[in-house]
Image (cartoon, rainbow, N blue to C red):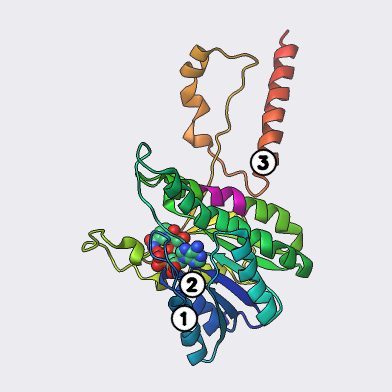
Amino acid sequence: MDELRYDGRVAVISGAGRGLGRDYALLLARRGAKVVVNDNGSAILGEGEDEGPAQQVVNEIRDAGGEAVASTDSVATPEGAAAIIDAAIRHFGRIDILVHNAGNVRYGALDEISIEDFHSVLDVHLMGAFYLVRASFPHMKAQDYGRVVLTSSIGGFYGNKRCVNYSVSKSGMIGLSNVIALEGEAHNIRSNLILPGAMTRMADGLDTSQYPPLGPELVAPMVGWLAHEDCELSGEALVAIGGRMARIDILETEGVFQPEWTVEQVAARMDEIGDPATLKNLGLNGYLVHLGSSFEMAKAEREKLAAQG
Ligand code: NAD
């Protein structure tokens, strides 16, 4: 296969001053993309600002012969996100690729976490994603092209203790990415989720002595593929961790029909209702497929009952 390149493409990568985002920025720039390296340089809790990390990655890209500009606005406000997208338009004239990767972490059990800590994580991860998408989508629509990669997490799909703010943010990405995929479909805009796993400062304080190698460079190729024009996937969730690549999906059972139900009947038929053998992924148009098949089942079963008298 020929090398997959991004010549002529402009990418905005949030949180690209460190960790995973830095590797994404270096990879895309190495292969011809012009990159807006966004990072406000905040500490892991999301506090403070530092222009250093974004500028350092820009310097690395330029030293290697690539093109990049630094943006140190925060993704956590509509104004900040608009300024980040505006940097792409001002410096490079367009935006083709949006990778929302910026993140902070604040731990706390459900009965302890402060409202401020809940909002702080939602603001950077989920609201940040929406603000960036809201600012870039009109440009992508107008040019009939876009590739969006939002960062989810296994914490968003499976949940994780003491991380309700993070889990809620990362599962919120599922709905956001699917809406982008649906509304962007006719405009050649594709949107997917990356569920990464890598050793970054987010692992500070964990005992990682028994972990296999978990470099960000083992995640970046998946993001690179999702950001490429040849990639037609949309509304999918891809995993990359320690060399393992996989796909995570939403599944629905076929279900069973009765014209009326009691609580006891639900209890008695739970095995059939949840029968794993009938689990199916309904695809990008799952919303309509779900309604259609529910209505079809109800109609067909009612007609059958009516015919039986
Ligand atoms: P990291 O802390 O190394 O990098 C995150 C970067 O985001 C930092 O450089 C930080 O300055 C920047 N940032 C924070 N708030 C910002 C804001 N308001 N505006 C702009 N930039 C901001 O962390 P990482 O491990 O590289 O994580 C990157 C993404 O991957 C995050 O969304 C994280 O939740 C997700 N993730 C990471 C892992 C993992 O194993 N490392 C697992 C699942 C998900």
Percent x, y for residue 43? 39, 65
Q: Which mark is residue 57?
A: 1
SS state under label 2: loop
Occupied quadrant, residue 181: bottom right
Q: Which residues are magenta?
A: 171-177
Q: Does the Cβ of the disc 2 residue fall within 8 Å of ligand 1?
A: yes
> Which residue is denoted by mark 2 in the rendering?
16
Instruction: Name the quadrant of the C terminus.
Output: top right
Residue at position x 51%, y 48% from top? Answer: 171
**Predominant secondary structure in magenta?**
helix
Q: Does the Cβ of the disc 3 residue fall within 8 Å of ligand 1?
A: no
244 up-or-down from 267: above or below: below
Mark 3, Cα crowd under 10 Å, few <14 / some 14-19 / many 20+, is few
The amino acid sitting under disc 1 is Val
Instruction: Name the quadrant of the N terminus.
Output: bottom right
Mark 2, Cα crowd under 10 Å, few <14 / some 14-19 / many 20+, is many
